[in-house]
Every structure is written in C-alpha cells, then in structure tokens.
Image (tube, rainbow, N blue to C red):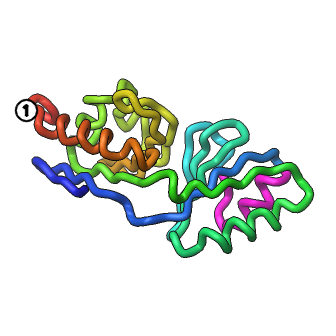
C-alpha cells in the first residue's frame, strides 16, 4: 500500500486504537485525564503527545488515537473515568485506517481531490477536520508542515490510495 513519487511518500499508518468519544464538558475532562492527554476544545484542532492524539471532530465529539495494543484496556478505563456522566465511547479501530502523506508537495497532492485551502496559514500544523476526498468522507490532520494524516474507513482506503496515486502521476501536481 506504500507509494512514493517525486519526494512524496504515501504509506499506511501503523495499526492503532481508535476511539470515538461523545460527551459533555465534565465527562470529557475526566476522560481526557484518564487518556493522559487533554481533549482539545478549540474547533478543528488536535493535540498529540508521545503515542497518543486527540482530534476534535465536533462540539461534543473527538477521535482518540493510541497504540493498537491498548484498545480493550483503554475503552474500559475511559468508560470508568466518565463515571455517571453521559458519554459514549465507541471503538472504531477495525473500521478505519490511517494513511500518511508526506513531502514538499503533499498539500498539492491532497488538493487534487480535496478543495480545502491547505496553505499553512489556512490549515496549520495541528489542524484537523472532516472533509471529502473525492467522493469519500475522511478526517484530515496536518501533523507536520509537510505531513498529513488521513483517517478513512477501511473499505474506502483502496479508493483513497488510487486517488493519491493518480494525483502523484499528474505532472502538474507540485510543479
């Protein structure tokens, strides 16, 4: 599934635990504490430290990423942390995969199938959002200046990879 072209590398991210959390303010604070990373409250922002990340997806929704081996333990720990507060914690680890797109023309490659302004001033490092890539809904996260991470449903990953390959083969991309 890995591909590279003209300084652009596209690869599948390592397996991960992916938890979708929906909750109110009090529960999200307790869940964040148990997760070991504060869940961002600013819209379209992600926080990351060591081997964990929390991506804001909506006013009461986050995607949490952690090492694959922690899935069951982490789901249980976060549910315990929420206590009696209303919260939903759903493990979507097997539904999604991560795809990394990195290199000097990574934004150009992504813009071949996505209309977002990916200039660093408009979409800085740490920004994330749900968006369309071609005809597929993805979560797009800029992890570094020239690196993006796509979170996509596993069944749509071949389509996304084909679109990325097509963009990378276009001589006008990145030029």
Q: Quadrant of residue 116?
A: top left
Q: Residue 52 in the image: state x and y as whole percent.
A: 55, 65
Q: Would you say 137 lies left or right of 78 here?
A: left
Q: Would residue 53 be visible to someone looking at this image?
A: no
Residue 59: name its quadrant: top right
Q: Residue at x 81, y 45 (%)?
A: 24
Residue at the right extreme of this rendering:
84
Q: Which residue is mark 1?
A: 171
Is residue 67 visible from the viewing direction of this image? Answer: yes
Q: Residue at x 16, y 40 (%)?
A: 168
Left or right: 106, with 175 as reference point: right
Q: How many marks?
A: 1
34 in magenta: yes
What residue sits 44% from the left and 41% below the top?
140
Name the magenta segment's main secondary structure. Answer: helix
Residue 1 sits inside the magenta stretch: no
Residue 56: x and y, percent? 61, 44
The answer to whether 50 is drawn above or below residue 20 in the figure is: below
Q: Quadrant of the C terminus?
A: top left
Judged from this view, the residue extending furthest toward the top is: 115
Residue lying furthest front: 155
166, 24: nearer the viewer: 166
Local SS, label 1: loop
Residue 75 lies, in percent from the top left, at 69, 65
Q: Position of residue 103 (x, y in %)?
A: 23, 50
The N terminus - image quarter: bottom left
Residue stretch in magenta: 26-39
Q: Residue at x 78, y 47 (%)?
A: 23
Tell me if mark 1 has few (under 14), some (14-19) or many (20+) residues whose alpha carbon lies within 10 angstroms of its own. Answer: few
Please name whichever residue, 8 or 40, is drawn nearer the observer in this view of the structure: 8
């Amino acid at each position: 599934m890995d591909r590279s072209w003209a300084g652009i590398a596209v690869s599948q991210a390592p397996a991960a635990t992916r938890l979708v959390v929906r909750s109110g303010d009090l529960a999200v604070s307790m869940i964040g504490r148990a997760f070991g990373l504060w869940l961002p409250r600013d819209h379209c922002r992600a926080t990351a430290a060591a081997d964990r990340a929390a991506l804001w997806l909506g006013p009461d929704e986050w995607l949490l990423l952690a090492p694959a081996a922690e899935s069951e333990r982490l789901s249980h720990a976060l549910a315990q942390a929420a206590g009696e507060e209303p919260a939903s914690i759903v493990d979507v680890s097997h539904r999604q995969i991560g795809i990394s797109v990195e290199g000097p023309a990574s934004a150009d490659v992504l813009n071949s199938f996505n209309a977002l302004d990916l200039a660093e001033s408009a979409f800085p490092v740490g920004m994330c959002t749900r968006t369309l890539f071609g005809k597929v809904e993805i979560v797009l996260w800029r992890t570094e200046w020239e690196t993006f991470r796509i979170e996509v449903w596993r069944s749509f990953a071949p389509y996304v990879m084909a679109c990325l390959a097509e963009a990378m083969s276009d001589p006008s991309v990145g030029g």
